[in-house]
Image (cartoon, grey):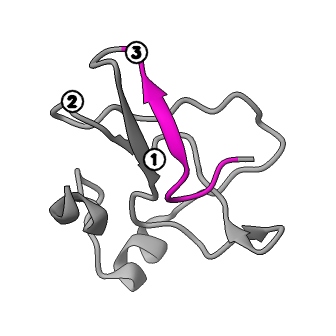
């Protein structure tokens, strides 16, 4: 299981980054931690940040236009809140 803040190795820039959820995402915890989805980002030395690729597909989240609207976000590249701390 992967979770936001977990350390991951980036083979492209050969550095260790942290996983960041990319909005929108639904609160979904496993073992008390928010889960990570396919397409979340690795905050490493690469620009733009690389997207994570899921290795398991036993769970998923879908977002309709209503979900986007309720989140207050647009379906475009949204910078992670963690990015400013790098």
Q: Is residue 42 shown to the viewer in this render?
A: yes
Residue found 63% across the figure and 33% down from its top: 54
Whether the residues at callouts 1 and 2 have beta carbons within 8 Å, the answer is: no
Residue found 62% across the figure and 76% down from its top: 27
Q: Which residues are magenta?
A: 2-11
Residue at disc 2, secondary structure: loop
Is residue 7 rendered to the left or right of residue 15? right
Q: Residues within 10 Å of mark 3 (few under 14, many from 20)?
A: few
Residue found 52% across the figure and 62% down from its top: 63
Is residue 52 rendered to the left or right of residue 56? left
Gap in angstroms between the C-alphas marked 3 and 2 = 10 Å
* Residue 53 image position (x, y, % from top left): 55, 29
* Residue 73 image position (x, y, % from top left): 28, 72
Q: Nearer the viewer, residue 70 or 8?
A: 8
Residue at disc 1, secondary structure: loop
Q: Earlier in the sequence, mark 3 or mark 2?
A: 3
Residue denoted by label 3: 11
Whether the residues at callouts 1 and 3 have beta carbons within 8 Å, the answer is: no
Residue at disc 3, secondary structure: loop
**What quarter of the picture does the C terminus occupy?**
bottom left
- Label count reads 3
């Amino acid at each position: 299981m992967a979770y936001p803040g977990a350390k991951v190795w980036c083979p492209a820039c050969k550095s260790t980054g942290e996983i960041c959820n990319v909005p929108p995402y639904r609160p979904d915890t496993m073992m008390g931690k928010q889960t990570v989805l396919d397409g979340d980002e690795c905050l490493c030395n690469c620009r733009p940040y690389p997207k994570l690729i899921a290795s398991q597909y036993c769970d998923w989240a879908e977002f309709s236009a209503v979900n986007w609207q309720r989140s207050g976000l647009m379906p475009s590249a949204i910078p992670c809140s963690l990015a400013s701390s790098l």
